[in-house]
């Protein structure tokens, strides 16, 4: 087998995890092939580690295949049970060192600063110390929860050193990315709190260096859908076009699915349209119990936990309206809303959502907006979207929504993330000093 000429390595929680950033990794990998990378690898976790973490996972037989040239690697843990968590990190770090030692010009992208960016920084440093002199460019992408989870919890518990390490590791990469303007604002906001505690200048550095890199979407999977395929998919679920309101996302408290069910029950829409709740997540049992509370709702409210990637756009295309009333909760704030833009590409009825986190960047001015947690407001908007909106207004909104969503096509996002002239550059090792004034870390 010949030696590759250009390699991209992405570190992420990949499929089968139900997470928008798993889809991002897939789309960036596919885009890299189209942009001339001849070896693309997704470096991720063994399945048993993902299962043990309790993450929502797709059935393995429902995963779409990757194109030839993309390899998903799940390195085995290194060490025994005396190293309970670090074994998996050691496996990924060691594998990345091996790849860097092969002398192939490489771009490495880490998504989630903890632990994936830690792996990259450690592996690159280790490869250089070992004398391999890797030709590598590193990109670290903050997706939101890595900051609001690790950094925020560290500060709340007084463990400011952990917060400082996340930010300093981020800054040791060649390119700093954030999944939305909202996410960059969150990064800077939490960095300011670290600075106030420690005398560092993280916020200043991050404000200057972080670029926005929106989630890449395979727009071709949602455009020009075969009408017969749409009808067949709906018929298999006992549905018909414009006969249902759709929620399709992770089923969690933060997505507002409980509010949507209560709003639907109070609406005029419920008399003629079904409500379809599709997805998986830690609130599935709660939603199932909520549906069972009202006799007969198990026929009007359909809970689908086995929707495949191929079926998703077909369900989106056929709905009378799509509702994602996401709301901020302590453990999660929507940093973008990939499902919103996918729905906008697919067409069908209007999108109903909230302006929480980065959703405004996802939908622009092309959606029907309600306040987070406003159940009566959701009820009124459901009735407007399904029963009161005229056909001309619906078509005009659908066209504007699709035009807005096309800006997130995966090739466009890839090219903005990594311009052609910068896709492979020889990097000289640089020691990155922590920005500081005053208190030592």
Image (cartoon, grey):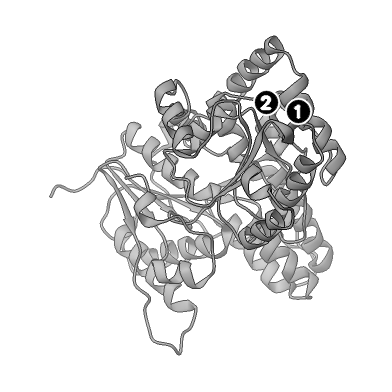
| N-terminal-most mark, 1 or 2 | 2
Answer left or right for 246 relative to 49: right
At a point 53% along the width and 27% down the height, the residue shown is: 346
Answer left or right for 84 relative to 246: left
Q: CA distance from mark 1 to mark 2?
A: 7 Å
Residue 279 percent across, percent down from the top left: 56, 49
Q: Residue furthest bottom?
A: 82
SS assignment at label 2: loop
Answer left or right for 37 relative to 287: left
Q: Tell me if residue 18 can be seen.
A: yes
Residue 193 percent across, percent down from the top left: 81, 61
Count of numbered marks: 2
Quarter of the view holding residue 344 = top right
Q: Which mark is residue 368?
A: 1
Q: Neighbour class for label 1 at 10 Å: few (<14), some, many (≥20)?
A: some
At a point 80% along the width and 70% down the height, the residue shown is: 156
Answer left or right for 420 relative to 111: left
Q: Is residue 159 above or below residue 364?
A: below
- Whether residues under marks 1 and 2 lie with C-beta atoms below 8 angstroms apart, the answer is yes
Q: Which mark is residue 350?
A: 2
**264 vs 12, nearest the viewer:** 264
Q: Is residue 304 above or below residue 232?
A: below
Q: Is residue 388 above or below residue 423?
A: above
Quarter of the view holding residue 31 = top left
Q: Is residue 404 above or below residue 203?
A: above
Q: Residue furthest front?
A: 295
At a point 74% along the width and 32% down the height, the residue shown is: 269
């Amino acid at each position: 087998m010949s030696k590759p000429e250009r390699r991209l390595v992405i570190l992420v929680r990949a499929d089968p995890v139900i997470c928008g950033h798993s889809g991002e990794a897939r789309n960036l990998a596919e885009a890299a092939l189209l942009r001339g990378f001849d070896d693309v690898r997704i470096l991720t976790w063994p399945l048993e580690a993902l299962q043990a973490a309790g993450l929502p996972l797709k059935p393995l037989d429902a995963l779409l295949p990757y194109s030839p040239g993309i390899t998903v690697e799940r390195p085995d843990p290194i060490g025994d049970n005396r190293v309970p968590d670090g074994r998996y990190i050691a496996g990924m770090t060691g594998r990345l060192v091996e790849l860097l030692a092969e002398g192939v010009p490489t771009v490495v992208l880490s998504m989630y600063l903890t632990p994936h960016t830690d792996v990259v920084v450690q592996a690159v440093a280790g490869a250089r110390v070992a004398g391999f002199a890797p030709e590598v460019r590193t990109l670290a992408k903050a997706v939101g929860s890595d900051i609001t989870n690790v950094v925020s919890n560290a500060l709340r518990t007084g463990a400011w050193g952990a917060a400082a390490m996340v930010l300093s590791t981020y800054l040791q990469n060649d390119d700093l990315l954030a999944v939305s303007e909202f996410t960059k604002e969150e990064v800077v906001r939490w960095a300011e709190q670290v600075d106030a505690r420690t005398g560092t200048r993280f916020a200043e550095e991050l404000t200057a260096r972080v670029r926005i890199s929106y989630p890449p979407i395979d727009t071709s999977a949602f455009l020009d859908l075969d009408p017969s395929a749409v009808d067949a998919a709906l018929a298999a679920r006992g549905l018909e076009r414009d006969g249902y309101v759709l929620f399709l996302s992770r089923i969690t408290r933060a997505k507002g699915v409980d509010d949507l069910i209560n709003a639907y029950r109070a609406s005029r829409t419920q008399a003629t349209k079904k409500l379809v709740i599709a997805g998986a997540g830690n609130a599935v049992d709660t939603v199932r119990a909520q549906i069972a509370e009202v006799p007969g709702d198990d026929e009007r409210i359909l809970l689908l936990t086995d929707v495949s990637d191929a079926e998703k756009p077909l369900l989106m295309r056929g709905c009378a309206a799509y509702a994602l009333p996401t709301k901020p909760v302590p453990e999660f704030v929507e940093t973008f809303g990939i499902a919103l833009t996918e729905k906008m590409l697919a067409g069908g009825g209007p999108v109903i959502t909230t302006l929480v986190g980065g959703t405004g960047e996802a939908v622009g001015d092309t959606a029907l907006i309600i306040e987070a947690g406003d159940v009566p407001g959701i009820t009124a908007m459901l009735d407007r979207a399904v029963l009161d909106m005229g056909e001309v207004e619906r078509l005009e909104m659908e066209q504007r929504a699709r035009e807005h969503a096309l800006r997130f096509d995966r090739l466009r996002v890839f090219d903005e993330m990594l311009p052609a002239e910068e896709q492979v550059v020889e990097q000289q090792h640089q020691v990155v000093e922590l920005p500081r004034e005053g208190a030592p870390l």
